[in-house]
Amino acid sequence: MRIALPLAIALLLASCGGGGTPQDTLQTDNADSLELAERMSRTKKIFYNIPSPMETAALLKKAGASYNGKILNDVKNVDKYTAASKQALNLGVYGADLSYASVFNHTQESMFYTSCARRLADKLSVTSAFNDSTMQLMEQYQSDREKLLEIISETYWDMDRYLKVNDRENISALMIVGGWVEGLYIATQVAGTNAAPELRQRIAEQKLSLGDLVSLLGTYGDDPTLNPVRDDLKAMHALYMDVSVGGGGATTSQQDGITVIGSESGAATLTDTQLKAITEKAAAIRNNYIN
């Protein structure tokens, strides 16, 4: 399985077209073919560097940590997201929470978060990704983690082809950011009570994906909806500037059916001061997105 669940949900939903009527609107993307090609290239890179909550959860289980649902976004918040930008961001957030709950086999919570994602997709008029057939399959295999991931992954690859030609990639970008921020938030919150060195290293290695994410948003030019999000990521990137990830690129490996991202040198390090700053910034950005 090569694709992180929150991003799979985010991009497959963004691929489904349709025009909603939320309070704010996201600009239509007028990028030319070269810009679109560059954007898709960067998006694929992000796929392989994203801080997957599944990876985080697998590391936590290996270290003996237990599930902590209190750190996830409350399902009761779903109806307060009336702006399109908030809906898109929290579609990514709930996707990350869904994957975290799924890895720990908390099936009831998983279905709650699936329901939240579907409601936000409906508000954004991209409901077809969560159609009745897909929902039935997800419910049928809710206790089978790998099968659940397979369902989402297959749906993504079908929808990805549509994403390349539609004009709603800015919604996709916001959902990617929401999933990335929530994944980092989960990792840093757990790292505060669990000193697993593998988890600490994964947090350090997110410098790789963060740079790609900042560059991806940079391809959209001046967009009033995306600009604040871009500023958030730049502020986080500044905190990562002195974090060492070695001289190599990113690598992928399979552990317990989950794709684990790392640096080629394996030398990613994070000081206590850096971790504290990143933890505080991740919490501030994430809490702004969910409130």
Image (tube, rainbow, N blue to C red):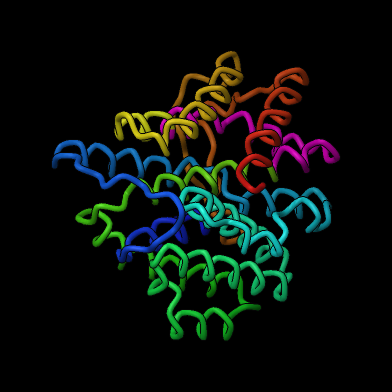
Q: Quadrant of residue 287?
A: top right
The image position of residue 217, as x and y in percent, is: 38, 34
Residue closest to the eye, 36 or 137: 36
Residue at image x 72%, y 64%?
104
Reply yes or no: does residue 211 show up in magenta: yes
Answer with left or right where residue 91 lies relative to residue 74.
Answer: left
Residue closest to the eye, 133 or 151: 133
- Our reading of the magenta stretch's main secondary structure is helix
Residue at image x 42%, y 62%?
124
Q: Quadrant of residue 270?
A: top right
Q: Residue furthest top?
A: 242
Residue closest to the eye, 149 or 259: 149
The image position of residue 134, as x and y in percent, is: 45, 80
Answer with left or right where residue 264 lies relative to residue 69.
Answer: left
Q: Residue furthest left?
A: 33
Residue at image x 42%, y 37%?
226
Answer with left or right where residue 157 lies relative to residue 99.
Answer: left
The image position of residue 82, as x and y in percent, is: 54, 57
The image position of residue 151, as x and y in percent, is: 46, 73
Residue at image x 58%, y 82%?
139
Answer with left or right where residue 122 lies relative to residue 156.
Answer: right
Residue closest to the eye, 167 or 132: 167
User: Which stretch appears magenta?
Assistant: 187-213
